[in-house]
Image (cartoon, rainbow, N blue to C red):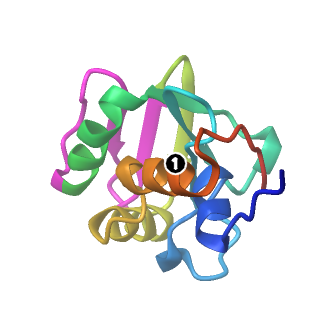
Amino acid sequence: MTVQVSAETSRLTGWFKSSHSSNANACVEVTFAARGQVSVRDSKFGADSAVITVPERHWARLLADVLHGTADNGVVGIEHTVDGGAVLRGNGAELRYTAREWVAFREGVRTGEFHLAAAEVARTENTGTRMAVSGS
């Protein structure tokens, strides 16, 4: 059986960044590819980046905290830097983002680009199951 995977589904099952990042190489990257978790990394470092993994059940709360500037949601600590950037801490890892990177991510969150529900719908409609895909 051949499964057709749309560009949108591919984006949602591999590493992706906010459309507000333009063609920048330094961004917050997210993947929904692994069952039950969402992973975040820094695209500046690609596969060598530290990765923070968030249980799916906590992802919506983290996104709300990103939008509202909350410092700690109990899973991932968010430290806002004086220059407008942010530091994420979780799973023993730390990710540092510049103001430009953080603003692009926050705008993507605001416009719904990182909502888990969209990824779930895309996976179900296109494959009938979750896909374990890694990309860059």
93 vs 13, nearest the viewer: 13
51 vs 57, nearest the viewer: 57
81 vs 5, nearest the viewer: 5
Q: Say left or right for 93 vs 73.
A: right
Instruction: Examine the rendered structure and indicate whether residue 21 appears above or below residue 105.
Output: below
Q: Say left or right for 67 vs 94.
A: left
Check residue 135 for magenta coloring: no
Q: Say left or right for 38 vs 23.
A: left
Image coords of residue 66 (percent x, y): 28, 50
At 51% from the left edge and 76% from the top edge, which residue is drawn?
A: 19
Check residue 72 for magenta coloring: yes
Instruction: Examine the rendered structure and indicate whether residue 56 appears above or below residue 83.
Output: above
Region in magenta: 68-89
Q: Quadrant of residue 133?
A: top right
Taking the view exactly as shown, the residue that stands out farthest to the bottom is 22
Image coords of residue 97 (percent x, y): 51, 54
Disc 1 crowd, CA 10 A, few/some/many (<14, 14-19, 20+): few
Q: Say left or right for 106 vs 38.
A: left
Give the amino acid type for the residue marked by disc 1 in the picture: Thr
Image coords of residue 86 (percent x, y): 40, 49
Q: Which residue is mark 1?
A: 124
Instruction: Tell me the quadrant of the picture where the C terminus can be found.
Output: bottom right
At 27% from the left edge and 67% from the top edge, which residue is drawn?
A: 110
Q: Considering the numbered disc 1 on the image, is that residue within a helix, a strand or a loop?
A: helix
